[in-house]
Amino acid sequence: MITSAEEFIRLRASFDRAEYSRAAHEAAPMEVWEEVVDRFPEYRRWVAHNKTVPLEILARLADDGDEQVRWTVAGKNKLTSTLLVKLATDRSEVVRRRILHRRHLPIEVVRLLLEDPVEEIRRAAQARVSGE
């Protein structure tokens, strides 16, 4: 288990494959995730990348000012319908596109994407509905 924000940063920055992998796969207490998000904004994307990060942290990161962070969150499998709706209406086209790459999408999310301002996103959502 990752026990501090500093440990997470050290693991993520490591050139040792085993340590780098720990940053992506090991759990940490909620306080550690919160500290990384609050103190080390440049590592928020890597927090979202972690396989064990709690939904509460993903919800915070879904509002992040950095498009890359939100894009990473949009690719997570464990997102709730509420988070999927939020990301399907994100101001960034690349975040909305990322939602379309998910295997399963709630119909309410597909409906939102059918109304997207970007024609290509609307077409991709329609293809999902049509089973293409």
Image (tube, rainbow, N blue to C red):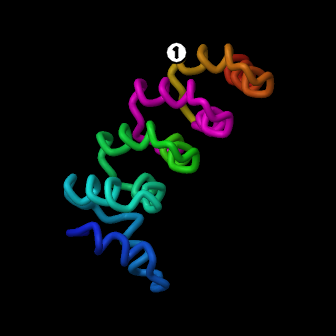
Q: Residue at (73%, 18%) from the top-left corner?
A: 126
Q: Which residue sits at x=28%, y=56%? A: 33
Whether the magenta-drawn stretch holds residue 34 is answered as no
Callout 1 amino acid: Glu
Mark 1 falls on what kind of element? helix
Q: Percent x, y for residue 70? A: 52, 43
Residue 88, magenta (yes or no): yes
The residue drawn where x is 60% and y is 30% is 91
One can see residue 13 in this view: yes
Magenta segment boundaries in residue numbering: 75-102
Q: For mark 1, does the 10 Å Cα neighbourhood hold few (<14), some (14 to 19), or many (20 or more) residues?
A: some
Towards the viewer: 119 or 106? 119
Residue positioned 54% across, 17% down in the render: 107
Q: Is residue 32 above or below residue 18?
A: above
Check the image and report above or below for 13 versus 79. Answer: below
Q: Hey, which quadrant is residue 6 in on the image?
A: bottom left
Residue placed most toward the observer, 6 or 109: 6
24 relative to 90 in the view: left or right: left
Q: Please determine whether, in this image, residue 52 is positioned above or below residue 91.
A: below
Which quarter of the picture shows residue 25? Answer: bottom left
Residue 119: where, in percent of width, then height? Answer: 79, 22
- Left or right placement of residue 128 versus residue 106 in this view: right
Q: Quadrant of the C terminus?
A: top right
Residue, disc 1 = 108
Q: Position of residue 63 (x, y in %)?
A: 44, 37
